[in-house]
Image (cartoon, helix red, strand yellow):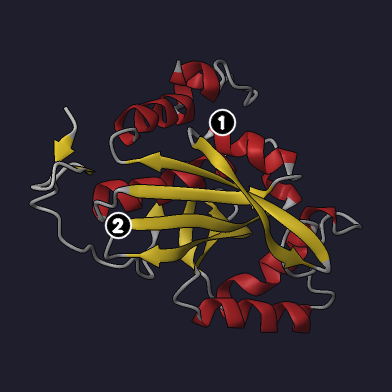
């Protein structure tokens, strides 16, 4: 049924028990294959510089608002600036087996009053390709938002021309909501921004799919997946 106010106008469902949530903080989030650590220059900058420079070009930075740090000193400055930020709140993705940082990611546009946050600054290195780290990192962030902090909504936004990011959003269970045309100017070019979201009501089913996909039973001895994450969502 549609809820009506005393003027007979339709309004949203009542949330009588809603209270503003805590803001995400610099916590460590542990997984089976990787963990997320609060980004730190001393612990992570050298590893990330090597990981980001494990290929000769900076194609992975095309849709980010900055370019790949050219030197270790540039990377130290870049990481130190991100590490001091509270929004975005940055994490390093650490490979548990090697204990080395292989990427970074953030929670951003944090709205604790309404229980909303975005996963952004997704900056995977080539060392994360064909691994379980990227999927587990997104799972850990959503588990933190929904299960620990009890947020209502998790967002994903990306350049409308960034096909890998759009496919990743759908694979991770985010629902497409629309496109903001001429949203920003990025590196001197127009950017239309696609919006995606997962709601707290959708999270339990999504969480189950993540956990089934990430389980050791879903992979062969050679590390090949047996079932795709998309199939486990159906």
What residue lies at 56% left-to-right and 32% top-to-bottom?
170
**199 or 4: nearer the eye?**
4
Count the marks: how many?
Answer: 2
34 horizontally vs 200: left or right: right
Q: Using the image, determine if residue 146 lies above or below residue 207.
A: below
Q: Residue at x 50, y 82 (%)?
A: 84
Residue found farthest to the right: 56
User: Which is more N-terminal, label 2 or label 1?
Assistant: 2
Q: Is residue 234 left or right of residue 163?
A: left
Label 1: element kind: helix
Nearer to us in this view, 5 or 42: 5
Q: Quadrant of residue 48?
A: bottom right
Q: Which quadrant is home to the C terminus?
A: top left
Local crowd at mark 1 within 10 Å, few (<14), some, or many (≥20)? some
Residue 81 position by quadrant: bottom right
Front residue of this view, candidates 189 and 131? 189
Which residue appears at 72% of the width and 61% of the height? 64
Crowdedness near tag 2: few (<14), some (14–19) or many (≥20) residues, C-alpha within 10 Å: many
Callout 2: helix, strand or loop? loop
Q: Is residue 98 above or below residue 223?
A: below
The residue identified by callout 1 is 171
Residue that appears at 75% across and 70% down? 66
Please provide percent x and percent y for residue 160: 70, 45
Q: Which residue is mark 2?
A: 115
Image x and y of residue 70, in percent:
84, 74
Q: Quadrant of residue 18?
A: bottom left
């Amino acid at each position: 049924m549609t809820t009506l106010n005393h003027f007979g106008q339709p309004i949203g469902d009542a949330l009588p028990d809603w209270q503003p949530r805590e803001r995400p903080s610099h916590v460590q989030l542990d997984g089976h294959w990787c963990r997320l650590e609060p980004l730190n220059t001393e612990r992570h900058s050298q590893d990330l510089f090597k990981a980001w420079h494990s290929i000769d070009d900076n194609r992975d930075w095309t849709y980010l608002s900055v370019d790949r740090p050219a030197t270790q000193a540039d990377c130290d400055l870049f990481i130190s600036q991100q590490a001091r930020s509270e929004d975005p709140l940055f994490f390093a993705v650490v490979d548990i087996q090697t204990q080395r940082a292989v990427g970074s990611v953030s929670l951003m546009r944090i709205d604790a009053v309404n229980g909303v946050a975005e996963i952004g600054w997704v900056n995977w290195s080539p060392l994360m390709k064909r691994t379980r780290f990227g999927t587990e990192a997104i799972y850990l962030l959503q588990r933190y938002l929904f299960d620990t902090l009890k947020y209502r909504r998790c967002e994903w936004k990306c350049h409308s021309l960034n096909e890998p990011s759009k496919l990743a959003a759908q694979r991770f269970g985010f629902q497409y909501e629309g496109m903001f045309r001429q949203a920003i100017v990025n590196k001197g070019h127009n950017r239309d921004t696609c919006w995606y979201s997962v709601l707290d009501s959708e999270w339990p089913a999504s969480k189950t799919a993540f956990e089934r996909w990430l389980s050791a039973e879903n992979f062969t001895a050679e590390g090949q997946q047996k079932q795709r994450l998309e199939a486990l969502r159906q």
